[in-house]
Image (tube, rainbow, N blue to C red):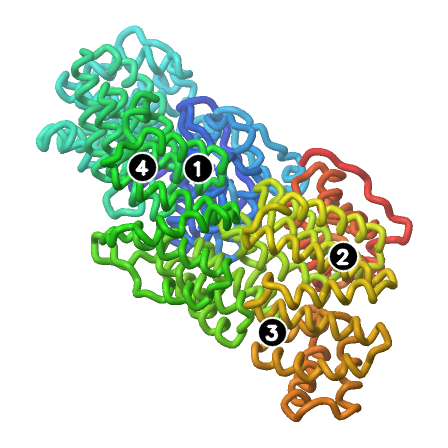
Amino acid sequence: MQASRSSQGLIERPRLIARLTGARQAKCILIQGPAGCGKTTLALQWRARLAPFGHGCAWCMAASGEDVDALLGNLFAALARIDPLIVREAMLIYERGGALPSADSVAIPLLNGLVRHGQQLTLFFDDFHHIADPWFHELVQTLLDFAPRHLQIVMVSRTAPSLSLSRLREAEGLLVLNFSDLRFTFTEAEHLLQTREPGIARRDTRLLYDQTGGWGAGLRLAALERGTGSSLQGERLPLQNAGDFAAYFNREVLRQIPEAELDAITRLSVAHRFNDALAIHLLGADMGLATMTRLRRDNLFLLPLESSTREPWWRFHPMFRDAMGARFERLALSVQQSTHSCLGRWMGERKFLVDAVRHCLLAGEDSAAADWVDRHARGMFLAGEMRPLVRAVAMLPPSRLASRVSLRRWVAWAQLCYRELDACRWSIELLSRHRTAEDEETRHQLTLLEGSLAIQCEDTDAGERLIPALENLPASHDAILEGGRRNILGWLRIHLSQFEAARAVLSKPALLMDDGMPLMDSAFGSLQSHCLLGYSYFRQGDMRQAEPVLHDALAEADRALGLFSEAACNAASFLAALLYEVNQLEHLRALLEPRFNAIERVALPEALICAALSRIRLGVLESSVQEALSDLDLLDEQVGRRRLLRAQGLALSERVKLLLRAERVAEAGEAVKRLERLAGQSARQRTAADREVRAVAVAARAQWLAHTGEPERALPMIEALMAGNDYAFQERKQVQLEAYAVLLLNSLGRPDEAHARAEGLLLRARKAGLVRSVLDAGYAMLDILEAARRADRLSASANFYLDYLRLQHEQTGRPAAVQTPPATDLQEALSPRELDILRSLALTMSNKRVAQAQGITPETVKWHLKNIYGKLGVYGRDDAVAKARQLGLLQQDDVPAPRYGS
């Protein structure tokens, strides 16, 4: 079969393209061989074949020495060119993760994005052998293990990757093309040389073919030399490996290029990527255009890069770049420094910040490197581009960081975004210590930093102390300063139950940036204000006012910033709590399922609690207490790690309720004691958060006493909470306490008093739009309210709302299961790992214990559970186990076999 010339000037390999075409259903293709054997060229040709058929192709290139940040940046950029929604959740989780998160916590959101994308896509990893970090290997392994059917992964590597491919090989889901496959045949070599010099003698072709052994780089060098008019006569080096390449290239090829052009190419090779504009800037208009023309005309080991712009970008083949790099090191030091200086300016002007800083530092221009960080830090911070900003700052010499207060400020903001809260406190202390009295900007920024830190720590005490400083900040056209003050003050007023004052601050018009556009994104944007505005109504207990505000905030954030933006995650979390309260459970599940991983990473502490508790409570209604307890374990770890006292108290309070519901009374008692110890830690504090922890501890003890047969001790505790100031302005909390008091009065044999209070309970619940606050009080709640109706103690309005509550109770149930495939199909569809996890569910193991037994992460367990539920057509653990036993997939005595590794 004859080779043909591609549009890129590369010789196509029809026999290899045919093998790739035959493997289009394979999950993984590995193109493996030594340097210069045509691996990347073949992959580029395969990509060109796929693109016209609407097949998405994402190209991720690895370079020597790149860290995880750079590798993930390449991967995200490649997939985002296909569809930004594929990577939005994973990018957000990684950007806001601070310390390197687990590989699965990034891989699984990527898989979710790929599943949502739903169209054929091939992901190319070029030069995979440069990827040495085990973390990235683990990420790719997860992508391979769980790849949806429409995803194919192509790896181009000099060495065998450190991945487990045996399962794919056994399932015929793997194609490997090695060096023997990649060698040119004589016919292909002949065609390559004919394109360079038509009529070349066959004996000369045979001589070159024997000399190169069909090695692609050697043949291309020979063809290149023929193009320069050199003779084929005389003694020759062998051309069959990278060492031969360097010697031959320096002796036979470089001498054919004029010295001025060779110097230009050498200087250009310092850039990891380049286009015509960069070449012109670096080399001048005439030489820049001439150099790019020669590179393209002679196909001088030039490889294309994917770009989101119309202008093509390029890189050099690694062997060519290495040869040029050695030559660059021999240039005069002044030429090297001027080259890096010029590249640093060009990269900086285009906001390629990491490249700009790298080149400036290599040019010895430390101050210029710091200037570029100063110039771009504000915009990158607002856009959430924290990883490249942090990398650029980390590259700067410590002396530069010490001499620039502005850079220290961005270090502190980055630490806050990454929730490195102790480090942030230390940075704030350093800034305070070194700030001059005249430095008003730093003083203002410090106030915002301290206020934002108080929010992330739920430290209302520190927040209250900041109120005078926040209110006394001078009026400013700086959108960050004004937006920060607005949202921090709004948050503080909400937690102090000063709801009208909070809304007066949060309802002001959107602030404008320097370019005239409204500041919407970031913690200081108008969308965050909108979220907090809705939350103020929810926390006050007015569901009717909260619902439209939160729906609008979520719709606007989704439209303007995307599903996984910080504002969207906060709005979704607050709305989730509201939807649970008004019993809109189907909407709640649809809202939380696609974005809960992002909420765990970026939402405000109270937003995280709202989302997590709503999910847990939904799980109790639709699945099982055991699954809810597993989710609560994960929440405990998160809030404990961040030392969020109020959140820990709310999580422990929920644990008491769940354990009592499951009749695990002794465990519930231990949870009450833990909660009381937590409340004791804040006994001397007078902040809103401390007061709330003490209040939930009292309520939990009352619930436990009532459950263990001492309602007479529980009732005074509940009455005291209702009469106190802790929940004086929170109607939802007051209704919950009132409902519990009605239950306790009835259990104490005082039904007349219970019936007398039923009227007020129903009217208050109706006015605020509360449903679950009444229904979740206990199994007997509706019976007591019905008894009050029979005793003619309810008005027409209260009767109406009781009918509504009963209807909501009847409609609360498990959703109809989807159609389940036949058992024989399921046996094949469920992987061995999924069957093992099913057996673990049968033993009521928590997600954490399942992860430990299987040697995987909790994120991976959640992914498996999602797949299992989907395949079985169920929504929870108990239903999954029951359906599996019904279909014969599990036996009563099934015990999972421990497995380790992936």
Whichever of labels 2 and 4 marks the residue nearer the N terminus, that label is 4
Residues under numbered marks 1 and 3 in contact, where contact means CB atoms less than 8 Å apart: no
Q: Amino acid at mark 2?
A: Arg
Amino acid under disc 4: Pro
Near mark 4 (Cα within 10 A), the count class, few <14, some 14-19 or many ≥20, is some
Please identify the residue farthest to the right as the structure is shown: 893
Q: Secondary structure at mark 3?
A: loop
Q: What is the distance, in whole Å, between disc 2 and disc 4 at their CAs?
A: 67 Å
Could you tell me which quadrant the N terminus lies in? top left
Sequence-wise, which precedes: disc 1 or disc 2?
Answer: 1
Name the residue beneath numbered marker 1: 415
Which residue in the structure is indicated by mark 2? 701
Q: Residue at x 70, y 57 (%)?
A: 654
Residue 744 position in % (x across, y down)? 79, 71
Q: Point out the image quarter for the C terminus.
A: top right
Element type at mark 4: strand
Q: Position of residue 491 (x, y in %)?
A: 45, 57
Q: Choose the circle earlier in sequence order: 3 or 4.
A: 4
Instruction: Answer left or right for 311 relative to 115.
Output: left
- Mark 2 is surrounded, within 10 Å at the Cα level, by few (under 14), some (14 to 19) or many (20 or more) other residues, namely many
Q: Which residue matches tag 3?
A: 582
Q: Nearer the viewer, mark 3 or mark 2?
A: 2
Q: Secondary structure at mark 2?
A: helix
10 Å neighbourhood of mark 3: few (<14), some, or many (≥20)? some
Q: Which residue is mark 4?
A: 304
Query: Which residue is painted at 55% across and 40% down in the image?
Result: 28
Estimate the spatial distance between the alpha carbons at disc 1 and disc 4, rounded to whole Å: 37 Å
> Residue 35 in the image: x percent, y percent?
42, 22
